[in-house]
């Protein structure tokens, strides 16, 4: 299990968290490469179906940020 | 630092992204050539091994390269700048080399449109042949009439075969005749034909190129009768034509020119026993080519100097000898050469059987007849117009020796070509002179010669063995080997940079480069304008002037600008940081600050250049990013990180990145042997001398106004500051002293990008005020590319993967991503770009989209938040709907954040692209709606900045509401005394308030606050509350100028004693002209009170200058007063530095303290006592002060509610966050909302006013458009599925959905596209699934999740 790396699907609000992720890059912050970003226009767009779909497709975690 | 070709692209992202040709003044070799042969061009081609191309360059002006390559006295070599290094390049020999490599017949005959007009040329010498060649190229029917049985004139019968083999000449004549030129030999003018006759015989024009074939006489008795006296030209001609085959006995030759030497060497070869040359001056004056003289010596010709013949000795009419007299050199004559004077009584006899006088030739014009109407000049040569070469008879031209008297062949070639141009124009009826009058082009700006150029020997040709030389007429010189020739050619220092070989013209398929564009020169155009903005920038300081840094001696001492290039992916080493001397990675780098700034000993720049501290830190941090092991040290005097977020960057550089900051001015750099390392010596703060060695030194050079800009300022009659920057006033910070002329950027003073951008916007606003009436009179409508209908097409995806220099490709394996993406479904085209955002890449993308008929585009690069609009524009230009686009952020979200793990970063990049591919196939074209913009503005905050903004908006014709919470306008300015420039602030303030109050487009709302904001860009409805009254104002844009306030210190006993005041309180005393100030004997200022502290980690920017200014004011009131300023770093940036100098001169004492050893303030017996550790003495000192001023921080007026209502962000310090720190300093990311003044960051009055104007300028770009387009990515309702529950109408923050009131779908919901912001809240809340969000539809997000 020591090699196991979780796959995390990340829903980021275009206006805040997506921008923050951009800024993390600009600031050269280093973080684990486990997230896969889906840009959404607002967390208001988030639907429970997206969470379920993520898990159905093998995600180990879902992160919604906005 | 790297090599750059003459044709180059400035840099990868340059706009325009086109290539440029770099040209300096014309190469001296080319200008020196009387035949205008482009020596630089063919030498370069030879260096490249392109011999045919070299000949093409030569034959553009000279049809006889092999001939001139052998016999030309090469004035080009005299002009060659390589002689500054070692010796001139063997240009002439190289020309021969090129001609020897390629048969001229291999050059293609250009397509010539034949004309019927006939031209007659008299004489087949260099002038006549050249004229014939160029006339034939023009299509004329050319006939040459030649008196001799052979062609070439003097080239054939004057120059012996051992110098110029007849076969070479014949081939080159053939090169000319192959164009259709006919040569009629044995046809003598005056005997067989006449000029007048030719003209009457149907020749449109005649060119006379008869040369100088008549020998000058010695003037000795018997010269014409005595047997054995043969004139030089005749002797050579008879030899050349084979009429003389052998001679016997002794030969004496009189003269010192080429003919004399040629005659001597010819006589030797024909069997003469002894050959002597008698020359009346010395070797130095000899006009013959040096090579020839040398050859003659080698061949044992007896050259006697300072001898002149006085009498011919004869026996029976046959020559036996020549009586000579010795000469000596006297005074210089008209030619500048010293005149030979006979030495009396020094006569002697030279035995001679043959005497050859070779003292010059004349034109033989005896063939002229009266009917010809051609006149001669006073020397007996043909008189012509110096530009057109036309003689006194219209249509008759002359050139070459016949016009100039005996001269060199290349001059005759030049004359022949010029005459050909005239003849062509004459026949076509064109103006012969147009564009040909000699232009005075200065010859001074050449490609600099590198200092450390290796000296090399000049290439020389080998010669055949001496036996062979003397015994026949075989060519003496053998020519250069290819290896030697190319090495010689590559010694060229490329004076003009571009060598004008015109190879680029041949290969440029677009036809962008032509002969004409190569000739393009500066031209003057007059433009009528209403305003002028000068934004000509700065010139980096040239550090060679500071000898002790050895910038021009040590390769590893570079300027900061050069280091920027080293760091850049498009730099000389493609972003690989290596030092210039040995291309090794530096492990230890030092930055020296204030090079050419704050320096009056070695240069005159007393000001601070404002930007160098910050750029040095940035360079050090980036260099550390390249190599985390790097040891980086910055040597400085004061660390001036006074800009927004700069102090934090400085703190991080120190604490997180481990950059060393050493407060010391280094005075010496010594190279360590040949290692390239540099030893530096400096004195540490504690007084200890340190010697340290670095791999590289970076000089943080300052900013200067260029001499050219100073000249321009003089022309505009603009007042300048002592530092040579443009003088401006605080209330009109971008206006020069000349009305209508504005300034932005570092011409106004050294400044960083954000301030320069603010200035630029402000200058645009100021310039625009004069032009209100002319708005929209010069607009151009853009061509709209029709949108392609892609409905029904299967997806054809194009994916563009960006390197972003090395930002992405340095971590992510781009080739691997490319291979991966190529295999994804529906992907039709994949490529990578160094910079996808560069202008030429956009053009290429447009072409690719069309060529491959792509209908969905993915760019994997940086963030869509900054670059999406750019690529969408490209889609539009390619005829695609802009929403058929998806951007994948593999830079910010992959390469930058997973630097340590390239494999995972590459995997993530692939995954992200795969998700985008899955989504984009489902994207469809979307439509945008157009909305009107309400041309009314609102400015919140009536301080200086807000007032300036309102005034600027109003003056450009927009109704403006100015909202001020206080009962009067002016804000903090009411508490300020003077600006650093000495302007009285109360006067300024009342002036500005007066202007605002009398401006009819401004409505002032005092005692008012914003209580509610609705709507969006272009259409805001803002509620203003004033007491109990509410008013709704409709406006299109808003500027937040909510200002700041002074920090009330909790430290330093503030509030405990009236003698302890803040800076503003001291100003108030000055404003009140408080008499107690005159009695202050000891005043202390403490800087950084509340600023640059852990809880407020920013510099308040204005306090250093303010305290220095106040200290000077106190000194003015009481010169005896002791004034101390306790500081951490003095940050009197720009020309404020002069105030700091003035304060020190006035006796103000500056004592530095550190953050962990701050001054202590105590109240003792009614006195204020300050204890501080003196940084020089290292001891505590105690000062008893009558006045302690705390230079306290500037805090923003934090208003969370306002920020929320306008949806604008604030940083940790509660200052507003602008759209972009550098490029968008006066606007928010939120559309239609702008900012200025202290709410953005602490700043002095001039900068606050400038930003007020800048915010107005940015707002006007929106207001002036009249309309805006809405986003296409908005919600859409399917009324068939809608149940009309109304949840969407209740959840929407923008009131976009509403229930339809009547018609078929009454009771169902619909979306107002103008109001919808596309957040998708309604979509998620719709229980019927009736609402979709365009661009973020369920199926699209599911598709991404499916493949994630």
Image: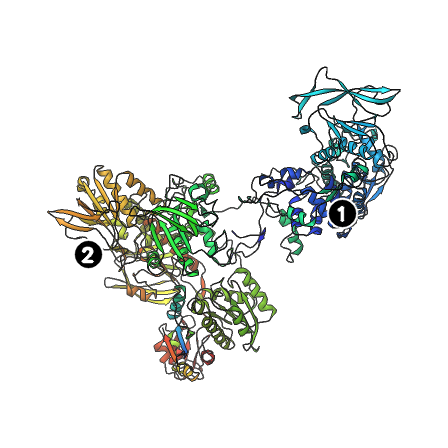
Q: Earlier in the sequence, mark 2 or mark 1?
A: 1
Report which residue position mark 2 lands on: B1050
- In the rendered view of the protein, which quadrant contains the C terminus of chain B? bottom left
Q: Position of residue B1194 (x, y in %)?
A: 27, 55
- Report the side of B563 relative to B104 (left or right): left
Q: Position of residue B301 (x, y in %)?
A: 76, 31
Q: Residues within 10 Å of mark 1 (few under 14, many from 20)?
A: many
Co-location on one chain, circles 2 and 1: yes
Instruction: Count the labels in the image.
Output: 2
Report which residue position mark 1 lands on: B137
Task: Tell me the chain of label 2.
Answer: B
Residue nearest the viewer, comparing B1090 with B696: B696
- Report the side of B1237 relative to B898 (left or right): left
Quarter of the image for residue B395 reads: top right
Query: Residue most toward the left?
Result: B1165
Residue nearest the viewer, comparing B454 with B803: B454
Q: Secondary structure at mark 2?
A: loop
Residue B856 in sight in this render: yes
Q: Are marks 2 and 1 in contact (CB under 8 Å)?
A: no
């Amino acid at each position: 299990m020591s090699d196991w790396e979780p796959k995390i699907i990340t829903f980021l609000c275009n206006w805040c968290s997506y921008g923050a992720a951009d800024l993390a890059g600009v600031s050269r912050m280093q973080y684990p490469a486990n997230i896969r970003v889906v840009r959404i226009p607002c967390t208001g767009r988030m639907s429970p179906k997206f969470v379920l779909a993520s898990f159905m497709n093998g995600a180990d975690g879902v992160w919604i940020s906005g | 630092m790297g090599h750059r070709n003459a044709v180059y692209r400035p840099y990868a992202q340059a706009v325009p992204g086109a290539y440029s040709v770099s040209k300096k003044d014309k190469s001296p070799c080319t200008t020196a050539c009387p035949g205008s042969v482009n020596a630089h061009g063919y030498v370069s081609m030879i260096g490249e091994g392109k011999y045919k191309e070299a000949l093409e360059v030569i034959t553009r002006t000279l049809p006889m390269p092999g001939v001139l390559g052998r016999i030309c006295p090469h004035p080009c070599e005299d002009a060659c700048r390589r002689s500054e290094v070692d010796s001139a390049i063997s240009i002439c020999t190289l020309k021969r080399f090129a001609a020897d490599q390629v048969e001229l017949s291999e050059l293609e005959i250009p397509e010539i449109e034949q004309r019927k007009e006939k031209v007659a040329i008299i004489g087949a010498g260099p002038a006549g042949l050249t004229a014939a060649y160029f006339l034939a190229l023009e299509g004329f029917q050319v006939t040459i009439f030649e008196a001799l049985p052979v062609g070439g004139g003097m080239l054939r019968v004057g120059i012996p075969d051992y110098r110029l083999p007849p076969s070479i000449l014949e081939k080159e004549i053939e090169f000319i005749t192959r164009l259709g030129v006919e040569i009629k030999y044995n046809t003598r003018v005056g005997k067989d034909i006449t000029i007048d006759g030719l003209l009457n015989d149907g020749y449109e024009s005649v060119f006379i190129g008869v040369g100088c074939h008549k020998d000058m006489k010695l003037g000795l008795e018997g010269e014409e009768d005595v047997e054995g006296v043969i004139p030089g030209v005749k002797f050579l001609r008879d030899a050349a034509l084979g009429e003389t085959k052998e001679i016997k006995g002794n030969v004496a030759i009189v003269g010192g020119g080429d003919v004399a030497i040629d005659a001597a060497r010819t006589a030797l070869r024909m069997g003469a026993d002894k050959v002597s040359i008698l020359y009346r001056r010395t070797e130095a004056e000899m006009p013959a080519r040096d090579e020839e003289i040398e050859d003659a010596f080698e061949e044992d010709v007896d050259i006697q100097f300072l001898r002149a013949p006085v009498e011919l000795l004869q026996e029976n009419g046959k020559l036996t000898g020549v009586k000579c007299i010795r000469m000596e050199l006297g005074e210089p004559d008209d030619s500048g050469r010293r005149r030979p004077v006979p030495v009396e009584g020094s006569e002697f006899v030279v035995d001679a059987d043959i005497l050859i006088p070779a003292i010059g030739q004349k034109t033989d014009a005896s063939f002229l007849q009266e009917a010809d109407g051609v006149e001669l000049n006073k020397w007996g040569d043909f008189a012509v117009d110096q530009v057109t070469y036309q003689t006194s008879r219209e249509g008759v031209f002359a050139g070459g020796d016949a016009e100039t008297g005996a001269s060199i062949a290349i001059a005759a070639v030049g004359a022949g070509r010029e005459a050909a141009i005239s003849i062509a124009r004459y026949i076509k009826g064109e103006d012969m002179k147009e564009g040909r009058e000699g232009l005075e082009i200065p010859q001074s700006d050449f490609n600099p010669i590198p200092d450390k150029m290796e000296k090399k020997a000049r290439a020389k040709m080998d010669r055949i063995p001496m036996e062979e030389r003397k015994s026949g007429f075989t060519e003496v010189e053998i020519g250069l080997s290819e290896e030697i020739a190319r090495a010689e050619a590559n010694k060229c220092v490329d004076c003009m940079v571009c060598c004008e070989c015109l190879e680029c013209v041949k290969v440029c398929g677009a036809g962008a480069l032509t002969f004409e564009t190569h000739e393009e020169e500066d031209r003057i155009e007059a433009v009528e304008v209403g305003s002028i903005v000068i934004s000509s920038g700065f010139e980096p300081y040239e550090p060679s002037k500071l000898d002790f840094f050895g910038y021009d001696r040590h390769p590893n001492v570079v300027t900061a600008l050069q280091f920027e290039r080293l760091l850049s992916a498009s730099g000389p080493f493609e972003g690989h940081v290596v030092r210039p001397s040995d291309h090794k990675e530096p492990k230890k780098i030092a930055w020296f600050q204030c090079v050419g700034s704050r320096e009056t000993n070695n240069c005159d720049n007393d000001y601070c250049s404002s930007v160098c501290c910050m750029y040095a830190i940035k360079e050090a941090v980036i260099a550390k990013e390249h190599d985390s092991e790097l040891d980086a040290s910055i040597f400085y005097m004061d660390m001036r990180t006074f800009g927004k977020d700069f102090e934090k960057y400085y703190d991080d550089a120190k604490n997180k990145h481990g950059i060393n900051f050493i407060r010391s001015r280094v005075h010496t750099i010594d190279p360590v042997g040949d290692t390239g390392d540099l030893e530096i010596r400096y004195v540490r703060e504690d007084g200890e001398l340190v010697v340290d060695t670095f791999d590289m030194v970076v000089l943080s050079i300052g900013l200067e106004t260029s001499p050219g800009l100073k000249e321009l300022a003089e022309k505009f009659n603009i007042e300048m500051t002592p530092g040579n920057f443009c003088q401006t006033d605080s209330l009109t910070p971008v206006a020069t002293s000349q009305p209508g002329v504005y300034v932005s950027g570092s011409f106004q003073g050294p400044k960083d990008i954000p301030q320069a951008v603010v200035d630029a916007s402000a200058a645009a606003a100021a310039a625009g005020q004069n032009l209100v009436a002319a708005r929209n009179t010069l607009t151009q409508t853009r061509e709209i590319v029709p949108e392609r209908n892609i409905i029904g097409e299967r997806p054809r995806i194009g994916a563009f993967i960006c390197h972003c220099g090395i930002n992405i490709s340095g971590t992510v394996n781009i080739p691997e991503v490319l291979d991966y993406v190529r295999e994804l479904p529906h992907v039709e085209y994949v490529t990578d770009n160094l910079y996808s955002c560069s202008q030429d890449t956009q053009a290429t993308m447009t072409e690719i989209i069309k060529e491959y008929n792509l209908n969905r585009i993915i760019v994997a690069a940086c963030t869509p938040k900054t670059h999406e609009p750019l690529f969408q524009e490209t889609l539009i230009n390619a005829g695609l709907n802009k929403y058929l686009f998806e951007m994948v952020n593999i830079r910010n979200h992959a390469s930058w954040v997973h630097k340590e793990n390239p494999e995972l970063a590459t995997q993530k990049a692939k995954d992200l692209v795969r998700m985008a591919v899955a989504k984009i196939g489902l994207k469809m074209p979307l439509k945008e709606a157009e909305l009107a913009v309400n041309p009314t503005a609102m400015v919140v905050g009536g301080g200086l900045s807000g007032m300036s903004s309102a005034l600027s908006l109003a003056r450009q014709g927009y109704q403006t509401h100015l909202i001020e919470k206080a009962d009067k306008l002016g804000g903090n300015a009411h508490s300020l005394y003077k600006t650093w420039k000495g302007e009285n602030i109360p006067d300024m303030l009342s002036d500005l308030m007066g202007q605002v109050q009398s401006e009819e487009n401004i409505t002032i709302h005092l005692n008012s606050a914003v209580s509610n904001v609705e709507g969006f860009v272009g259409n805001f409805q803002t509620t203003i509350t004033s007491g109990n009254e509410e008013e709704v104002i409709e406006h299109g844009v808003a500027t937040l100028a909510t200002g700041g306030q002074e920090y009330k210190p909790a430290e330093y006993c503030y509030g405990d004693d009236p003698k302890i005041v803040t800076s503003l309180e001291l100003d108030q005393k000055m404003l009140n002209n408080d008499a107690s100030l005159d009695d202050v004997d000891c005043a202390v200022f403490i800087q950084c009170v509340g600023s640059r502290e852990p809880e407020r980690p920013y510099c308040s920017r204005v306090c250093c200058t303010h305290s220095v200014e106040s200290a000077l004011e106190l000194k003015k009131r009481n010169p005896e007063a002791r004034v101390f300023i306790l500081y951490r770093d003095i940050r009197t940036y720009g020309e404020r530095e002069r105030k700091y100098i003035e304060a020190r001169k006035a006796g103000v004492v500056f004592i530095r303290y550190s953050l962990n050893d701050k001054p202590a303030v105590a109240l003792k017996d009614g006195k204020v006592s300050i204890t501080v550790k003196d940084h020089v003495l290292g001891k505590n000192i105690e000062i008893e002060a009558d006045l302690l001023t705390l230079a306290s921080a500037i805090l923003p007026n934090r208003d969370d509610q306002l920020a929320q209502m306008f949806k604008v962000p604030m940083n940790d310090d509660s200052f507003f966050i602008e759209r972009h720190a550098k490029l968008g300093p006066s606007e928010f990311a939120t559309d239609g909302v702008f900012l200025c003044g202290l709410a953005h960051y602490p700043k002095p009055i001039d900068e606050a006013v400038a930003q007020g104007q800048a915010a107005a300028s940015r707002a006007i770009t929106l207001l002036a458009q009249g309309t805006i387009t809405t986003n296409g990515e908005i919600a859409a309702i399917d009324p068939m599925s809608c149940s009309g529950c109304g949840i969407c109408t209740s959840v929407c923050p923008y009131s976009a959905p509403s229930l339809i009131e009547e018609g078929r779908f009454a009771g169902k919901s619909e979306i107002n596209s103008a109001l919808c912001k596309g957040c998708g809240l309604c979509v998620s809340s719709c229980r019927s699934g009736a609402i979709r969000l365009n661009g973020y539809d369920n199926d699209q997000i599911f598709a991404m999740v499916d493949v994630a």
